[in-house]
């Protein structure tokens, strides 16, 4: 795979000339592959020659600020306007007319937003519908994580699209480590502070993010959405400086997912990205905030694991949210109201819409399903059920495979568990004291308990399974079964790994 290719290598001027309003353009490429460059330069020149305008839509206010400042600095605000999807959603909900007829090109950047944010934003479908209503505009959709929304556009909306794709490149990942406990994040941060390594921490819960910030305030800056009550703790000047200079001076940046896309950090000293996010697309977007400079610019990735119990909860939660929507999809509004009388759909998937205006003061409403929210949960169920089927450490293996940390030939996953690493240090210290010593039944029992290797929660006791565990833990030991005078024992030997 050629990792040096950029968008301008796969989209020619001849391609752009052929683009039509009735066939949207879908561009899938990772961070640093020139999506924004293409809009700011190539598409800009096309629009300028035609005396036409470009509207670029983004889903995070920080992205808008950073990109708008770049457009103004480059003297290209005459052609390119920058705005948020949410602005037009708000206008539509409050019955303001949305007129985008002045734009020949409408660019939906980070367009995974339509489904990724549908889990908490009940209006993402409105902005998408507004875009598709613009019959004379060429519609361009760009993202690193476009799979789900692309399926919606092509398979559900039945809209044919022209697709350009650069495969995601994860070779910038130096190491991949998972962790199980919330408190482990603190341990990782302390370790990185001691090494004076810069880190970004993405946390789904703003409360958890703020609590981390308080503990490491001397070394950290904090960020969250302006709509959040915790925003009063955000140092706006520092965040503005970070956006303008594309780097931060502190050792630690602690943020919610409001920074998961669009914003670029250009800093070779940024060595670690720690992620506690459930949504896989948001997780991938978070990893892309560091703008990689060259093949030597690497980053260590730490990801919060989702265990089997949590996967079960996520699947059941999603299925519960879909229960009422599934019924409505197969029945009419009357039957729905009759079945769920006085019961509200707190998921927000079902909403009331005007069906017909009978008179000036008399309207009839109909129950509808927000298809983007519905599919968001459907896709989540499919992904989480697929991960469950993998078995032990299914989430870790799924993500490791996605990021290129699986050796198919040797059936080997090259990732670490942070808690296991800490445990391994203690185990290594213990094993070093018993190398070469004959281990009989009682000593074997102690070793088994120290290794604590479990499959489906069952403690493994055979030397062959323990050796597999030592190999997986990357510990340089092997247990050898021996026999002397009809007495069986084990001997531990040190090996090269």
Image: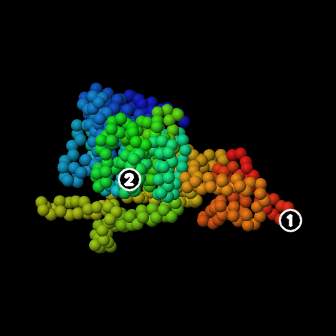
- Compared across the picture, whether 164 is left or right of 241 comes to right
Q: Name the residue under label 2.
A: 214
Q: Is mark 1 on a helix, strand or loop?
A: loop
Mark 1 neighbour class, 10 Å CA radius: few under 14, some 14 to 19, many 20 or more: few
Residue 143 position within the rendered picture, expressed as x and y whole percent measured from the top left: 40, 42
The part of the image, by quadrant, that contains residue 372 is bottom left
- Can residue 245 be seen at all in this image of the molecule? yes
At numbered mark 2, what does the secondary structure look like: helix, strand or loop? helix
Residue 106 visible somewhere in the drawing: no
- Picture quarter containing residue 144? top left
| In the foreground, 325 or 198 | 198
Q: How is the image coloured?
A: rainbow
- Please tell me which of labels 1 and 2 falls first in the chain: 2
Q: Residue furthest top?
A: 49
- 487 sits to left or right of 179: right
Residue highlighted by disc 1? 486
* Residue 72 horizontal/vertical position (percent): 27, 32
- Answer above or below: position of 84 versus 452: above
Q: Which of 365 and 406 is in front in this view?
A: 406
Q: Is residue 163 left or right of residue 137?
A: right
Residue 113: % across, % down: 36, 48
Q: Quadrant of the N terminus?
A: top right
Disc number at residue 127? none
Left or right of residue 311, residue 366 in this image: left
Image quadrant in which you'd find residue 7? top left
Observer-nearest of 190 and 349: 190
Picture residue at 73% right of the left edge, 64% below the top: 443
Residue at 81% over, 59% down: 482
- How far apart are the alpha carbons under marks 1 and 2? 62 Å
């Amino acid at each position: 795979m050629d990792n040096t290719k950029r968008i301008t290598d796969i989209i020619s001027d001849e391609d752009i000339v052929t683009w039509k309003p009735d066939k949207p353009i879908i561009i899938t490429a990772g961070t640093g592959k020139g999506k924004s460059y293409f809009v700011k330069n190539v598409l800009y020149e096309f629009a300028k020659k035609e005396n036409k305008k470009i509207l670029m839509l983004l889903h995070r206010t920080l992205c808008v600020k950073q990109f708008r400042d770049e457009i103004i600095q480059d003297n290209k605000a005459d052609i390119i306007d920058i705005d948020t999807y949410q602005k037009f959603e708000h206008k539509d909900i409050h019955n303001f007319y949305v007129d985008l007829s002045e734009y020949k090109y409408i660019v939906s950047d980070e367009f995974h937003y339509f489904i990724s944010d549908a889990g908490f934003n009940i209006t993402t479908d409105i902005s998408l519908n507004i875009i598709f209503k613009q019959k004379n505009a060429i519609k361009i959709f760009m993202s690193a994580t476009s799979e789900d929304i692309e399926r919606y556009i092509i398979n559900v909306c039945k809209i044919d699209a022209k697709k350009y794709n650069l495969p995601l490149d994860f070779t910038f990942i130096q190491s991949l480590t998972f962790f199980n406990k919330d408190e482990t994040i603190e341990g990782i941060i302390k370790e990185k502070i001691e090494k004076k390594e810069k880190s970004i921490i993405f946390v789904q819960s703003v409360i958890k993010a703020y609590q981390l910030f308080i503990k490491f305030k001397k070394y950290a800056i904090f960020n969250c959405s302006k709509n959040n009550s915790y925003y009063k703790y955000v140092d706006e000047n520092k965040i503005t400086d970070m956006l303008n200079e594309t780097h931060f001076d502190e050792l630690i940046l602690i943020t919610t997912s409001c920074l998961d896309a669009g914003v670029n950090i250009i800093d070779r000293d940024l060595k670690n990205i720690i992620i506690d996010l459930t949504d896989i697309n948001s997780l991938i977007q978070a990893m892309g905030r560091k703008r990689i400079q060259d093949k030597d610019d690497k980053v260590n990735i730490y990801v919060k694991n989702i265990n089997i119990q949590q996967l079960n909860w996520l699947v059941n939660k999603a299925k519960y949210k879909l229960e009422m929507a599934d019924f409505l999809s197969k029945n009419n509004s009357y039957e729905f109201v009759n079945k769920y009388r006085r019961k509200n759909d707190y998921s927000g998937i079902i909403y009331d819409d005007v069906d017909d205006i009978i008179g000036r003061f008399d309207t009839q409403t109909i129950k509808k399903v927000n298809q983007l929210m519905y599919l968001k949960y459907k896709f989540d169920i499919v992904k989480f059920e697929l991960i469950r089927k993998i078995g032990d450490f299914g989430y870790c293996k799924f993500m490791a495979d996605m990021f290129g940390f699986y050796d198919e030939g040797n059936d080997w996953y090259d990732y670490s568990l942070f808690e296991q690493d800490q445990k391994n240090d203690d185990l290594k210290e213990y094993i070093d004291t018993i190398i070469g010593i004959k281990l009989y039944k009682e000593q074997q029992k102690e070793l088994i308990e120290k290794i604590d290797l479990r499959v489906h929660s069952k403690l493994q006791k055979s030397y062959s399974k323990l050796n597999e565990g030592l190999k997986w833990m990357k510990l340089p030991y092997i247990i050898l079964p021996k026999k002397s005078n009809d007495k069986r024992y084990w001997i531990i030997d040190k090996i090269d790994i």
